Image (spheres, rainbow, N blue to C red):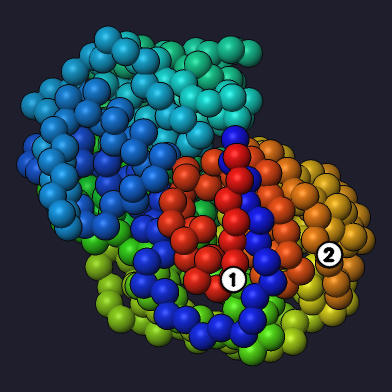
Amino acid sequence: MSSLRVKPAKAFDQQIDTIAPDKSISHRCAIFSLLSDKPSTVRNYLDAEDTRNTLEIVKKLGAVVEEEADFMKITPPASLSEPAEILDCGNSGTAIRLFMGFLASRPGFYVLFGDKYLASRPMRRVADPLRRIGADIDGRENGNLAPISVRGAEALKGYVYESPIASAQVKSAMILAALNATEPSLYREPHLSRDHSERMLRGMGAQIKERDGAIEIHPVTAPLEPLDITVPADPSSGFFFAVAAAIVPGSRVVLKNLSLNDTRIEAYKVLQKMGAKIEFVLHEEKYEPIGDIVVAYAPLHGVTVHENIAWLIDELPALSIAMALAEGKSVVQNAKELRVKESDRISSVVENLRLCGVEVEEFEDGYAITGGKMHAATIDSHGDHRVAMSFAVAGLVCGMAIEDTDCIMTSFPNFTALLSKLSEVQYGD
Ligand code: S3P
């Protein structure tokens, strides 16, 4: 199990064009390519553990993946193979939940499983609505915990479903099921969650329409068009370096070619509200708006975050570092979903901030941080990539030792290489 030590940094001015490609979009590229009968072309696919696992699953289902120097060709099988092996989703909630929705209406028997962290995350949020439309899904605790078995049906029933949570994983699983249903479906969520699935599937020719604040999904009658896509850089990976520039006095960073999708850049807007100087520069729009984000240091002040939570849920651990170093009190509320991420992120953020001498109050759905200063400590990542990277960034101000950092490989393999351009980073076992 590896560890990292990060030393305080001097002011920096960097342009970064190698932020990891978007994880959400990469997973979808691999899975959605199975909906066409022609090869999809994917440039800049995320080469990290989570998305590699998804690609391996797609291969086990019969796709042929050819990796060239600067693109990947994914040729779907004429019909899916029924794999003789279990399908390993590793650490990825996105992979397991999207595959549940996809495989539920593909005749065959499939077993999805993952690492010890994934094995404790809730799956009934997907299993239950799928079962209601005829899916045959099971797992430990009545289908809630992996391993998950799926006996794929010929087709599922259409549905009207009001999701109790704004979750793109649940929405995407239900959209994938609806594409193979016997009649149109209507999916409604309490707030818009990230909408990559809708954008990409529409781009492939699927009939997915807005209707009274819900989405109407029409079953596909023929294979979809293939994807021809360049995956933008991941705004949630870029955000670690946005926070870095916002907390190291005199610093500035230009993050190149990120998705500027509104459902993904809310944390940058909160950082801007806290006082950081931030500019968004749109360059192009294909499937997604894509451009650069420029972040420059300015003294930060506390902020309250209680809305649009689904749009910044992944960035809250990194935002908590900015909050701990800002003047005054910051509050995060309505973020109970943090408790079912790669770790219980409310408890792992609160515990580690306290180790750094920060005054933090814990709520069931968030926390309150009294900011101003933090000191070096030895951090336990709890096997959670975003917790590990957030506290590594805090090390740029006060020094930090982080234990259990292998998890960084799930989403951002070149994170430490980029961090070591800003300061001295030592690796340990
Ligand atoms: C994701 C959706 C979000 C997010 C996760 C990726 C996706 O999860 O936290 O990192 O790619 O659909 P939920 O759908 O559970 O909110």
Vertical placement of residue 289 versus 230, above or below: below
Against 263, is 170 above or below?
above
Kind of element beneath mark 2:
loop
Q: Amino acid at mark 2?
A: His
- Mark seen at residue 180: none
| For residue 84, side relative to residue 368 (left or right) | left
Some atom of ligand 1 lies within 8 Å of the CB belonging to the residue at label 2: no
- Marks 1 and 2: which is nearer the front? 1
Name the residue rendered at 46%, 61% in the picture: 417
Q: Up-down: is 94 above or below 110? A: below
**Which element type, helix, strand or loop, lies under badge 1?**
loop
Residue 155 horizontal/vertical position (percent) = 28, 22
Pointer 1: what residue? 423
Q: Nearer the viewer, residue 338 or 201?
A: 338
Depth check, front residue: 49 or 279: 49
The image quadrant of residue 3 is top right
Query: Is 335 in front, or is 221?
Result: 335
Res 337 seen here = no
- The residue under the point 77% across, 50% down is 378
Residue where numbered disc 2 is placed: 375
Q: Residue 19, image x and y in percent? A: 41, 64
Q: Are marks 1 and 2 in contact (CB under 8 Å)?
A: no
- Label 2 Cα crowd, 10 Å radius (few <14 / some 14-19 / many 20+): some
